[in-house]
Amino acid sequence: MSSKLYVGNISYDMSEDDLLKIFSEAGEVSSVKIIRKMNSGFSRGFAFIEMRSEASAMLAIQKFDGKDLDGRVIRVSDATPKIIKQSTVS
């Protein structure tokens, strides 16, 4: 487990400051980045949040995954990329 979290299904009106305030309830937040569309700058509905410690990240998952936030049920999970085994074709 890392201290970096994926937060999905956030409201398009949610700001990075809003997420910082909310996730600070689980511990110290190092960074918040809402992913935005390149052309318009509008939110794509998900963000990455880095917590100061793994313990804070785990608490944030327990506390916020499945929580209703601004009328949307958010998903919070570890943002560590999954390793996919590739099969070799002969």
Image: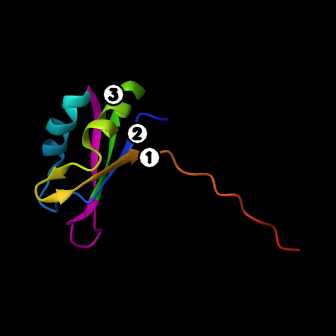
Q: Are marks 1 and 2 in contact (CB under 8 Å)?
A: yes
Horizontal arrangement in the rendering, residue 54 relative to residue 19 (left or right): right
Q: Mark 2: few, some, or many residues within 10 Å (few <14, many ≥20)?
A: many
Image disc number at residue 56: 3
Q: Given the image, on which type of amino acid does mark 2 rest?
A: Lys
> Which class describes the residues within 10 Å of circle 3: few (<14), some (14-19), or many (20+)?
many
Residue position for label 2: 4
In this rendering, position of residue 89 left or right of residue 45 = right
Tell me, yes or no, whether the two marked residues, 1 and 3, touch with CB atoms within 8 Å. no
Earlier in the chain: of badge 1 and badge 3, it is 3
Residue 90: in sight, yes or no? yes
Q: Residues within 10 Å of mark 1 (few under 14, many from 20)?
A: some
**Residue labelled with disc 1:** 79
Point out the stretch of residues depicted in magenta: 27-45
Is residue 43 one of those drawn in magenta? yes
User: Cα distance, mark 1 to mark 3?
Assistant: 14 Å
